Image (cartoon, rainbow, N blue to C red):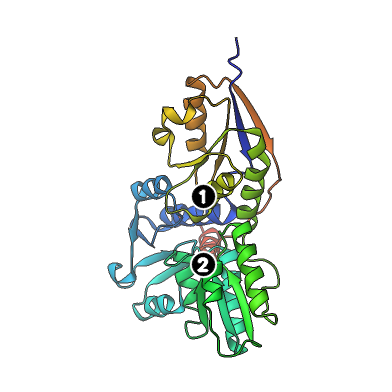
Amino acid sequence: MASGKKIILLTPRGFCAGVVRAIDVVKIALEMYGAPIYVRKEIVHNKHVVDELREAGAVFVEELDEVPAQARVIFSAHGVSPAVRTEAAERDLRVIDATCPLVTKVHLEAVKFARKGYSIVLIGHENHDEVVGTLGEAPEAMKLVSTVEDVDRLEVADPTKMAYLTQTTLSLDETSHIVKRLVERFPLIQGPHSQDICYATENRQVAVKAVAPLCDLLLVVGSKNSSNSQRLVEVCQNSGVPAYLVDDATDVRSEWLDGRQTVAITAGASAPEHLVEQIIDFLKGSGFGELEELEVREEDVRFQLPPELNSARLTQISMPASV
């Protein structure tokens, strides 16, 4: 007999197109060239993904000085600064760039505004890998803000020549408050042609808002250093519903489930689906017998592989088979 306790599984959830592309880049590079393949920083912010790729032969390093000269190195989905690209060229490293195209869009916007002599405000979280890379595109012209209070303290040389950009994995609501304050203080400030917060970040936050009135607990599958996963927890908590970030089923505490009738599950953009399935199994074993899927938006986004890999694969295909 059904317990009446229910799981609501959110769609969309989990891997976005940029994460799929980045993971594929590492796997294909390992297949084509063999181990070791060096990766600067975590390819995506999920420890399970990183551990799996490490076992397959990827070597994760913090900085390029840990990579042997002339070795093959992959830049992570979060992007790098021009200084890192220069260092790679100086050390004759063979680079495969797995930067998410939506992050590259922000970098190009930063370069465009800087060339026009604008003061640029970057909305983001200090020391996040993506923010570090973006700031590196125009360090003299760019200032980082993370809160409305940061905007209130902001001083620029020419308020008539200003632009703002954002990290791609921010909270939509929090960012809108910051942008509103920027416009109040600097009415002539310009923004990007289209918003910088990526489609996957937005869609997962919209889904969390949709499910909040229907559940009394949300579990977000994702690692602690995943910005977009952290934002999903905040969005739900701001709706008045308890939410917890869990790396996998072992992080779920039984006391969280006490008195709960409906538990919703989502996953950050770098969390693998098998971790979601493990948590579903755990909840079923804890008396949550009914499973319902709530699809809020459909996603059908794909990104091409980096040109470094595409050209190498075409060369392999065109070579005659050995006899």
Q: Secondary structure at mark 2?
A: loop
Residue lying at 64% horizontally and 78% vertically, measured from the top left: 185
Residue lying at 59% horizontally and 42% vertically, measured from the top left: 240
- Circle 2 Cα neighbour tier, 10 Å, few/some/many (<14 / 14–19 / ≥20): some
Residue lying at 62% horizontally and 44% vertically, measured from the top left: 208
Q: Which percent across, then down, holds residue 241?
A: 57, 39
- Circle 1 Cα neighbour tier, 10 Å, few/some/many (<14 / 14–19 / ≥20): many
Q: Which percent across, then down, holds residue 73?
A: 39, 65
172 lies left or right of 34 = right
In the picture, which quadrant includes the N terminus?
top right
The label shown at residue 229 is 1
Relative vertical location of residue 215 with respect to residue 56 in this rendering, above or below? above
Q: Secondary structure at mark 1?
A: helix
Q: Of the two numbered discs 2 and 1 on the same chain, state the one appearing first in sequence.
A: 2
Residue lying at 40% horizontally and 70% vertically, measured from the top left: 94
47 lies left or right of 319 = left
Depth check, front residue: 261 or 16:
261
Q: How many marks?
A: 2
The label shown at residue 146 is 2
**Of the residues tagged 2 and 1, which is closer to the observer?**
2
The label shown at residue 150 is none
Q: Which percent across, then down, holds residue 302?
A: 64, 55
**Label 2, label 1: how far apart the Cα atoms are:** 17 Å
Depth check, front residue: 148 or 287:
148
